[in-house]
Amino acid sequence: MNLKVVFYSVGKLTKFLGALMAIPCMVSLAYREPDFLPLGISAALTLFSGYLVEKLSSRAKDEEIRHREAFAIVSLGWVVVALFGAIPFLLGGTFSSFVDAYFESMSGFTTTGATVLTNIESQTHGILLWRSFTQWLGGMGIIVLGIAILPKLAVGGMQLLAAESPGPSPERLKPRIAETAKIMWGIYLLFSFSEVLLLKLTGLSLFDSFIHMFSTMPTGGFSSHTLNIGFFDRPGAETVITCFMFLAGGNFALYYYFLKGNPRRLFKDSEFRFYSFVMIAAILLVTFNLWGGTYKSIWSSFRYAAFQVVSINTTTGFTTQDFDLWPSLSRGILLLLMFIGGCAGGTAGAIKNMRILILLKKGYQELLRLVHPRAVIPVRLGGRPVQEAVIAGITGFFILYILVFLVSSLILMKLGFDMVSSVAASAATIGNVGPGLGLVGASKNYAFFSPLAKGILSLNMLLGRLEIYTVLVLLVPSTWRK
Amino acid sequence: MNLKVVFYSVGKLTKFLGALMAIPCMVSLAYREPDFLPLGISAALTLFSGYLVEKLSSRAKDEEIRHREAFAIVSLGWVVVALFGAIPFLLGGTFSSFVDAYFESMSGFTTTGATVLTNIESQTHGILLWRSFTQWLGGMGIIVLGIAILPKLAVGGMQLLAAESPGPSPERLKPRIAETAKIMWGIYLLFSFSEVLLLKLTGLSLFDSFIHMFSTMPTGGFSSHTLNIGFFDRPGAETVITCFMFLAGGNFALYYYFLKGNPRRLFKDSEFRFYSFVMIAAILLVTFNLWGGTYKSIWSSFRYAAFQVVSINTTTGFTTQDFDLWPSLSRGILLLLMFIGGCAGGTAGAIKNMRILILLKKGYQELLRLVHPRAVIPVRLGGRPVQEAVIAGITGFFILYILVFLVSSLILMKLGFDMVSSVAASAATIGNVGPGLGLVGASKNYAFFSPLAKGILSLNMLLGRLEIYTVLVLLVPSTWRK
């Protein structure tokens, strides 16, 4: 492991983070709130720390980044960014405990949206903006990670996306990442500004429009209101947010081709079709489960079902209703959706539709193999056979995902929490969803957990966000051998 | 599909079942109970029906049994045997509803031990014996299925056991099965009589000793008492039952080598070691979770933890305490054990340790592959590399198992049952355990479910018992093509 290269990249990343912290600082100044000072100090501290580390390891600037260094940069990058991102919350007095500040920051940068903030409405504009902005920045990282970095590293079957990734395809990692990142961020910015505009048109304030766009695009879930999107009670805003959540949960590489005049590539994509199918099926099932009992009219049932299903399945975690009060089938479907998530190459978390689809096809293929023991029947996606290495990577991912989920659930039970809450809190943090069921239901938050539990849940968010492998690989001894 | 061959074999099986029904009939006579008449009629009816079908399809006697016919014989065999096994319950007046009688019979023959019988103590000796005996017969079928048939059919990675299966290894299925069955049933009988003897020595009546041996050896769980094993409150009997449950959950092929003077093969077996490790770890975790809170002394905590853990992990389902009142960690561990089950080649159900172990190794192998992309790192079991086809079969099995579990859970939630009960009832029936949590907890039974729910739960038992694939294969259209 070439640690110099790792430190150099993480230092550079931290420097950028410091520069970006100037934005909430300026907003604070514009609102004439006293928070500009802690935000300014945080920005300076972050910028300087990043600059210092980058400078100290600058000799590694042109050294090669091998797979193992890439894993370390990504994992350490997220941990360090969340660390510096917590400083404004501490200096600004949002949280008195470091664990709380770190949890909120990690929740933001992993685009989870699980909150430990109990007095949201009394926060300043600067802090609320920073809190939501962490998600938007995290989302930028995730898109590049999913489309340019993980496919190259062959993490959990992500190599399947390599063919779709726009930009040149050189052997070395760095030039390709930069090129792809530029294209993807362009699309991300385009969607972001479109959503702000549309939200403003539905009657939200400019500040609220930005805050909630910063949560929608990265499928985060933080809101400036305790009642979340339910606070507005506006079908217009709900529709805009639902559409952009759905978009954010799709594959951004395919949007690139769509915008370049090739919409077929999006609509013919197996994962996108499966993603849409799961979404529609879940909305219908929940609508009919709610209709008559929970809500009188089919329109209300559909309205709340659609918003909550899209929100949970894209792992956003926005809410307009307390779905923990819904019948067990609806709650069960939402819990299951927390495991499925969006598409690879988007900002959604969890297992993702591409993997679920291939796992299902694998199950069916094995069934066929029993009837035709001598036939060669490959798993196909979009007509083309899927490589065995991709299936193996996905299988391994699924096993480790379930394992992390089970271990986390049992630890929470050990800490004394009930089964449903433990299971839902684990699923909602590993899947980067945010709200779960029971104690962490839609109308609740994560503030009551002990520091130990918060630590475990923060680790869940990191593991889930970085596709488990990226972090766990650093625990394998041979990763560190010369 | 050659249906004649299928009918011939199922007819023969039914004929044997009819002959075996004479046993409870004779017990009924010995106890001078009026039940000898319905039991006798059932025996005659079953014997005659089996004989008739066998005779009508006798032209197929020497025809070849291909893979697809083998799947059909096994699946149809279990369905038909459960059907005839339900007749004594109907004629004897144990149940007035066919669904209840069929549920109880399917629960017996699949060695699940989930009961819909609410007045156990008021049943006659003949009926109670038949009820327990169905499990013991099911266990005989399962051992042959697991050691001789499924490895040949390459179901869900079971081909891994082919090397261990004693007896000759001819290409055609029939002679090998007969040979292996004889050896395995010898061991099964030896263990069965040993357990009856030991139970008698601990002070149980001869009838109770037989009844509970008939439940232990096939890891069933039916008892002649509503309080189950807790009724006796005898540490001696609990110890005997715990030991035999543990034995029954192991691989019978390895016991063959053990008895032939080769104990190393058992103690060096990776699956047996993992099975023992999981068991000990779970007992310790539950003991310390119970100690101080649920039970005052560490001895009581250990006593109840050990019995319940071994019972659930071997998918027996005997109980001495209502573990649904235990803290959530203990309940969570028991729920997890319902998915793990015993070893392949024993009478336990669920996913089984061999598969869990290989899945975990696969997860770690994929982690290593990321660090060493060019290295060839096979998954090894007991020092030998595991074939890719075995891993693929296990992966497919795991996917389908989880899928059946999820679909069943959601259907139960749709029928209005709470999440924990729905999940536990599904896990406990697919895993052939018996008791679950919540509404189907240790002190409860399955009687309150609607006929539709009972039908789904019966199907779960069948699917789980026949390793999912065996049944699902019959739904693939090409299985039926000429």
Image: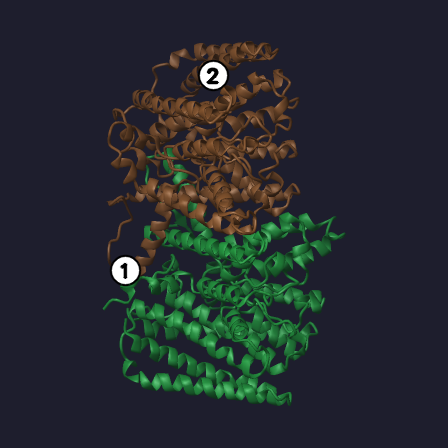
Chain colours: A brown, B green
Q: Chain of mark 1?
A: A
Question: Is any atom of residue B340 visible in this view?
Answer: no
- Give the distance between the C-alpha atoms of the residues marked 2 and 1, in whole angstroms: 56 Å
Image quarter where the N terminus of chain A lies is top left
Amino acid type, label 2: Leu
Residue at the far right: name it: B296
| Kind of element beneath mark 2 | helix
Residue B398 drawn above or below residue A164: below
Residue A350 quadrant? top left
For the residues beneath circles 2 and 1, the answer to whether they share a chain is: yes
Residue indicated by mark 2: A17
Give whichever of A162, A211 is nearer the camera: A211
Q: Position of residue B162 (x, y in %)?
A: 37, 62
Q: In which quadrant of the rendered image does the C terminus of chain A lie?
A: top left
> Are the residues flagged by discs 2 and 1 in contact, CB closer than 8 Å?
no
Residue identified by numbered label 1: A373
- Place residue A230 in its image quadrant: top right
Numbered-mark total = 2
Residue at the image point whose x is 44% and y is 17% from the top: A13
